[in-house]
Amino acid sequence: MEALLERAVGLMEQAGASYGDVRIRRDRTERLAVKNGRPEHIARSESAGLGVRVIVNGAWGFFGTHRIEEAALEDAVRQAVAIARASAAAQTDPVQLAPVDPAHDRYDTPFTKDPLAVPLEDKLDLLVRATKAMTGPNIKLAEAFFSAFITDQDFASTEGARIQQQIVQTGGGIAATAIADGDLQVRSYPNSFRGNFGTGGYELVEAMDLVGEAPRVADEAEALLVAPTCPEGRRTIILDGGQLALQVHESCGHPIELDRVLGMEIAYAGDSFLTLDKLGTYTYGSEQVNIVADATCAGGLGTFGYDDEGVPAQSTPIVEAGRFVGYLTSRETAPAVNRPSSGSMRASGWNRIPLIRMTNVNLLPGNAGTLDDLIADTDDGLLLVTNRSWSIDNKRLNFQFGTEMCREITNGRLGQVYRDATYTGITPQFWGSCDAICGPEAWRLWGTPNCGKGQPGQTARVGHGVAPARFRNVQVGVTS
Amino acid sequence: MTPKPARNPVAAREARLLDIGQAFVQACEADETDLLLADGRTLLTRFAGNRIHQNVGTEEAVAVIRVLVDGRLGVATADSFEGEALETARASALAIARASEPDPDWPGLPAPRPVTSVDAYDAATGAAPAEARAQFAATVIGAAREKGGEAAGIVEVSEGALAVVSSAGVAVATSHTQAEANALVTCGNGSGWAEAVGMRLADLDAERLGRRATLKADISRDPEPLEPGRYDVILEPPAVGEWLQYLAYVAFSGKDVDEGRSPLAGRLGQAVTGQQVSIWDDALDYRTLPAPFDYEGQPTGRLDLIRDGVAEGVATNHYRARKMGNDASTGHGLPASSSAECLPMHLFMQGGDSSAKHLLAETERGLLITRFHYTNILDPMKTVLTGMTRNGTFLVEDGQIVHAVRNLRYTENVLEALARIDGLSEQMTLVPGPCVVPTVRIREVAFTGTTEF
């Protein structure tokens, strides 16, 4: 492998690249789905290849191939250089990269149990038991999921960086679907859309107690089927961790990606309301709101050693006491804000270029105690639990989320269960209405394993640490 | 389908894939085996701010192996056809099967059925050089610059081959090319959009694309706020295509119908929307991107999903078809590596007798909508979607565009909304998806929010 990397660097230099890097990467994936007590889908995949990225004549070119061999590498460099030369024909200013010290290092995700080495039978047994524990007169689908992703990568650049990494990401969850009279309600644990994820091994799934939580999940799905629809109005709301994590993801994580801000994604998922003039001065939220992008926090789904440009993982302040202070950046974009790269460039595979991706965009804990404390402190409001749907405009201002379950809060106590709850708002107004965030004891990491971006499309696995938080005067309950 | 003789590189590649597949299936010790093989190249140029900022190419291969051992299913995927990769995947699939449980509903792999050959490969597109994509981008950028605008977008070409071989006797192969381009032009605070997709890069008109997006951007400057509420809308093909794809996702999968989580569950044969609505899937129609067979090697063809407002059918693979009491699949099987099983992937919506121009001219008050953004599902059983308008939303009064309006959030039951269609263009346009759809006018669509631009 080392010889291939050195050969790539030599070829890129010979071809006149002012910068070049090569990643040789192997991804192994396992996905298990059990439905109603029996395995429905068990699949393993393996993908290995190399990707060559060059700057020639001030413009980028990239070529990836699944053939990890010298002849294919030579062809990939040739193709990348030809593509870069074509790019240069429609180039205005040459690409300039923020400096980084070339690292020689290795990083490995710490884990206890290799998720791919745990016998399939053991993993299936856990999932089967969890689905069998989700029962009820209208529970038509009891599902349990497990997924694991192991990435091994060798990185080399013409600047001298040589970095090896192994990233291990694991997760799972359960979902009960109650169906009756043409109606359907889903309740999930620990999060919707196949569960929760982090960096680490099978111990993450074992700690979820999927079997123990299963009866409650089924009971709540049944309760939702007969619950009234969440009434419309302006209300005080508390978001639980799973929903709040996605709120952070959509309304903070994406708009702080500097490539979006600079218009590089405008034709696909859009740009951002957090324009360059707002850096350091704009009021993003209330003084309660402090947000960092932290690729170093233990166990986060977006935790790693180095990004895919060889920049070390770091923690970047994003919002301080409500004031917008930082972006997620790359080596190419960071000069636009006169800062070094925040180390946010990641590719979804050997066959994709690195893009600015969220690391762990974390809402820091406040001082409102536990979720129970926050509920007790709320006279009149709603608790919104577990994401069900999401949508946000192309500058990340107008959003609408739906949750699986909603509970009325009256005089500090939980009451009526509501179904089909939605809430909507405008990002800075919404975060400006945040008046309480639970404390460190309620803060935990959530993984978003399906973050889409870029063309060709890439799916990133990113993290969000949050504690439940309260927002005032929010529009709730919009339906058609 | 008899493989074409290996007289050209395209046919030679298909023959090679079939050879690899047949050798693999014959050597596999499982009771049943099928193998999906695909390889190809994708080259994509992105531009933004009137320059090319990303320009990438890849060559990729994928093999999806499905084995049955004592009624137990195992699936594994590799990204190489070389011996070691396929062997590793085979061992993995067998290990999975042995760890699984027998599926009492397993019907066996589908038998071969006659497949209609399609000509879906354009050699010039498959060989288009980086310079051709750069020139395409430069033409779009040039059109935007004429109005002082900035262009962003993509131009993408891809080519590939696909083969399916199974121990049940399936052995089919095909090749395809695709070209897709879009342009988002901004003029000040106005923005406009245009897109095109087809089998041939030569059929995509960069000049037209750039001019259309620029025109919309130019006339959408200084959008005015509009109160949420119900408005009549004229949906252009990209917006119609987006709704149609989401409708297909929530409603037209045989798996979801069988499991009771589709709005069509128990409603086949019943009116589910207006009589003016007919939706079908047909991968053999050359108005879309044609494909002769699905990922199980089963023949494609026309499948009526909604005819004159009545739910007529749903898409199945072999497993789901047999489970639902049908002899054969509808030819909509997804790769075995996908738990979704089956989906319609070449959608059509029937047009009417009007035109986009006429629909606008006869609109008293309403909105002209270019496209939607970030659509998502609020309630699958009621087909309630939400999303934003984007890149050209205009107020229409007395048959004329009055001015652009700030983008709006819709929250709408799509099947109910389609029932309120009161005009469709005769022309049906291919949009990415792929979907072939008309421009439609719908009365009283619900807009539940606004944004600041």
Image (cartoon, coloured by chain):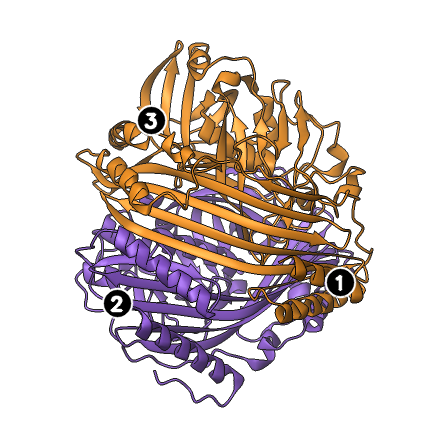
Chain colours: A orange, B purple
Spatial separation of the CA atoms under disc 1 and disc 3:
63 Å
Observer-nearest of B95 and A149: B95
Determine which of the numbered discs, if any, sits on residue A10 in the image: 1
Name the secondary structure under disc 1: helix
Name the secondary structure under disc 3: strand
Q: Is residue B86 above or below residue A107?
A: below
Residue A204, percent from left and from top = 42, 33
Circle count? 3
- Check disc 3 and give the amino acid type: Tyr
Residue position for label 3: A418
- Check disc 1 and give the amino acid type: Gly
> Are tags 2 and 3 found on a single chain?
no
Observer-nearest of B329 and B381: B329
Residue B44, percent from left and from top = 62, 64
Q: Is residue B207 visible?
A: no
Foreground mark, 2 or 3? 2
B425 with respect to A324 (left or right): left
Residue position for label 2: B32
> Are tags 1 and 3 found on a single chain?
yes
Q: Residues within 10 Å of mark 2 (few under 14, many from 20)?
A: some
Spatial separation of the CA atoms under disc 2 and disc 3:
49 Å
Q: Chain of mark 1?
A: A
Residue found 58% across the figure and 57% down from its top: A350
Q: Is residue A18 visible?
A: yes
Q: Residues within 10 Å of mark 3 (few under 14, many from 20)?
A: many
Observer-nearest of B136 and B226: B136
